[in-house]
Amino acid sequence: MSGWTHTHRWSVRWSMRWLVPVAVVALCVLVTLLDPLPLQMARNGLFDQLQRWQPRPYSPAPVRIIDIDDESLKRLGQWPWPRTRIAELTTRLQAAQPASIAFDVLFAEPDRTSPHAMMDLWQATPALRQQLQALPDHDAVFAQALRSGRVVLGLALERREQPGALPALKARYVATGEPAQPYVPAFSGAINPLPELAAAASGLGAIVFLPDADGVVRRVPLLMRVGDTLVPSLAAEALRVAQGAKNFGTQTVAQAGVGLAELRIGRQSVPTTAQGEVWVHYSEPVAQRYIPAWQVLAGEVTASELAGQILLVGSSAQGLLDLRFSPLGGALPGVEVHAQALEQLLTGGGGLVYPAWAQTLALLLALLGGLGVGFIALSFGAAFSLAALVTLLLALGALVAYAFSRQGVLLDGVAPGMTVIFSYVFSSVVHHLQSEQRQRWIRQAFSRYVSPNLVSYLIRQPGALELGGRRQECSFVFTDLTGFTSWIEKMDPQQAVRLLNDYLDGMIAIAFKHEGTLDRIVGDALVLMFSAPVVQTDHPRRALNCAWEMHQFSTAYVARLAAQNVPFGLTRIGVHSGEVIVGNMGGKTLFDYRALGDPINTAARLESANKQFGTLVCVSRAVLRFCPEWPVRPIGQVLLQGKTQPIEVFEPLAPEQAGDVAYAQAFELLRQQSPQALQVFSELASRRPTDPLVVLHLTRLRAGQMGDLLVLSSK
């Protein structure tokens, strides 16, 4: 009943293991829904890696960067340039009839090189001041150039209060569905261009980027807001002006509270994120995208190179520090981010989309994959479980790569991958612990049938489970109950089995304590083997110690039962050592690990010889030569039935005894065939009438048998 209870408890406890993948998946799904910063960074890292593997192929688009590069600064002077030079650059660009010109530059302060500004710095004479006042103001010259049309100026947005309000924005907004304001990035103030410049420009756009926590610009906002006023980005405004359109059209998702679905810029429909952003699929840097500003001012750029183009004026000069980190792993000028976003919008290909349903798909994949791998890890072996994990991860990777490469769709492979791996790891650990506990339970159960040291040996060395054997020195202990057959016939069966089991339980426990191998149980008899399967260099001493402790236990057990008026036989024990063949015997279906050889038969004969000697324990010289300090009484040179050579046999005494001097002296006279042996044994018998060895040798002497050779006529 106790075994069933243990098994039942074990089964109930481990039936709860199925909750492990459920709990792990539930936790991972919760983390995915909360979307903490580390998870965002890992997901963005995956998206960046996809772009590095497959950047957007550069396709010529009507977008060029008029680059205020280091060479332009070297040729034309340090930044900021006078507004008259900016006006000249604008006029030259307008002459080529571009689609639009957008300045990725903030003109928020008056030109410090203007004549009026210089008068405040110079201590000029009245005549000189009058001449300077007659000169045109640089900002006015630039404003005049802007009025020629199709120029967009940049403004900056900040998340802190700024003096002044937004200038009069040029675009109008038509909303389909909910207003866009609650969903787009919000700012509290703006740094505007000079009022006269803002009024002269055809459009105003924000030159703001919103990098992720790691500083990488992955998305470009097309719409933002200051208060309740929508503000287009520089790229969106440049595209509107290029089309000569007046309106932006916003469309929200049909479900309330979700966000934007698309932004219409004139005739151009742009799918956006819910926050009005576009994911940029970056291409590798190409020289064709850039035109140095100095070449335009020097007249080295033909009108055909600029006609119909959206021209973005910005700087790649290192000293101006207008650099942004891209997913491709390097830094690039901020103006190029605008340019690449416009290229993506105008070519209509190579763009990226992170759809709203992508998170739902990620959650579904995490749920199904995590539970599937978890249940497999709990149910199958390590190889199959690992193969399932690798297969699922490869399939997930293939799905993510296919969606990116063929559809331009970003799918989150991090959350499902994380869930699958965690589910596999925790489920595998539980499966391992379960298997380990099952092995311990099986080992304990198996040890009830097979010797524990044999079980441990086979577990450590599974290769030993093969037919075959080897020669080896071993020691053997044989035990048997006296009068067992008649005793079992007279006893109540239930009581007999209980008493016998108690006796065997104690005897076997002693054998296992001394790390003996239980060779077999035959009724009440035990056969023990030492130094196999694990070699024990002290096997004779182990065998003798085990035999003596068994003798003490069996004697005490008989005495305890006798006090209860319950009869029980004494135990006879034989101990011998020698070379045998040990190994797995039998066929391919059933193994029997045992020893074969004459030493086994000798140990069995010694056990049986106790009956003729009147002793309870017999030990051979082969054992005692490894235990010379053990006190013993010699029995004699014993010629066992069927043998041609006698062996020396002894009766061991308690280890704490000093020996039996009187018996030893009498036995020495017997061995020397002295005539005094009969008299000495007779005197000894008078003092020890119940000493079995004294009685044995006295009987032999009276029968005329001199010497210590005993020939046994039966087994």
Image (tube, rainbow, N blue to C red):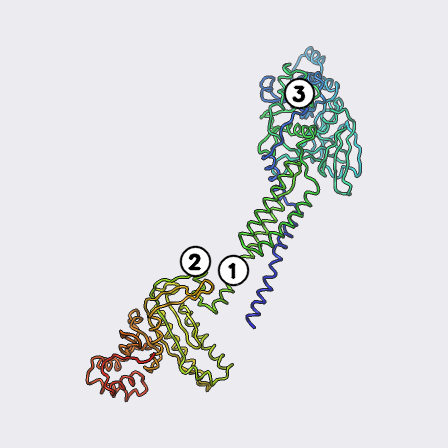
Quarter of the image with the N terminus is bottom right
The reply to whether residue 186 is visible in this rendering is no
Mark 3 Cα within 10 Å, few/some/many (few <14, many 20+)? some
Q: Give the amino acid at mark 2.
A: Gly
Q: Give the amino acid at mark 3.
A: Arg
Quarter of the image with the C terminus is bottom left
User: How many marks can you see?
Assistant: 3
Farthest bottom residue? Answer: 686
The image quadrant that residue 699 belongs to is bottom left
Frontmost residue, 526 versus 43: 526
Q: Report if the CB atoms under discs 1 and 2 are less than 8 Å apart.
A: no
Q: Earlier in the sequence, mark 1 or mark 2?
A: 1
Q: Residue at x 19, y 85 (%)?
A: 675
Whole-number angstrom distance, CA of label 3 to CA of label 1: 81 Å
* Secondary-structure class at tag 3: loop
Residue at the spot of label 1 = 436
Residue at the spot of label 3 = 112
Mark 2 Cα within 10 Å, few/some/many (few <14, many 20+)? few
